[in-house]
Image (cartoon, rainbow, N blue to C red):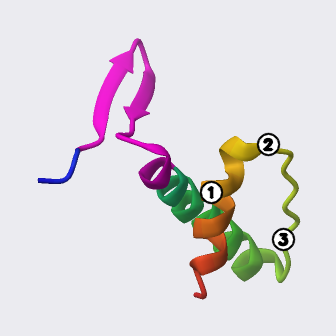
Amino acid sequence: MAPRVTERMYGTLRVLIFPGKPSLGAAAARDAAAILKDTIAARGEANFMMATGNAGLTFLAALRKDKT
């Protein structure tokens, strides 16, 4: 059985706790890709800037895999 994402609420703040870096990076990439796609559909273009260290490498790898 695969580890599950845990959800917790702190007041109105929803916090998702992922079992590891690969699942966190993949989820963040899906969210970012959806925002970028929506922005491109609405405006015809999108700007994306990020600064990261090693912690962002799984996110970038997952984002590059999304070809849609």
Q: Which residue is identified by label 3?
A: 46
Which of the image's four quarters has the C terminus?
Answer: bottom right
Classify mark 1: helix, strand or loop.
Answer: helix
The amino acid type, in three-letter code, at marker 1 is Phe
2 over 17 or under it: above or below: below
Q: Which residue is identified by label 1?
A: 59
Q: Nearer the viewer, residue 67 or 43?
A: 67
Q: Can you tell which of label 3 and label 1 is closer to the viewer?
A: 1
| Distance (Cα) linking label 1 and label 2 | 11 Å
Q: Nearer the viewer, residue 4 or 33?
A: 4
Q: Earlier in the sequence, mark 3 or mark 1?
A: 3
What residue is at 30 percent from the left and 31 percent from the top? 7
64 over 6 or under it: above or below: below
Q: Nearer the viewer, residue 48 or 38?
A: 48
Most extreme residue toward the left, as rendered? 1
Q: Which residue is identified by label 2?
A: 53
What residue is at 79 percent from the left and 42 percent from the top? 53
Most extreme residue toward the bottom, as rendered? 68
The amino acid type, in three-letter code, at marker 3 is Ala
Magenta-colored span? 4-24
Image mark count: 3
| Distance (Cα) linking label 3 and label 1 | 18 Å
Q: Earlier in the sequence, mark 3 or mark 2?
A: 3
| Distance (Cα) linking label 3 and label 2 | 23 Å
The amino acid type, in three-letter code, at marker 2 is Gly
What residue is at 59 percent from the left and 79 percent from the top? 65
Q: Earlier in the sequence, mark 1 or mark 2?
A: 2
Q: Could you tell me residue 29's position as x and y percent?
A: 58, 61
Local packing at callout 1 (Cα closer than 10 Å; few below 14, some 14-19, many 20+) is: many
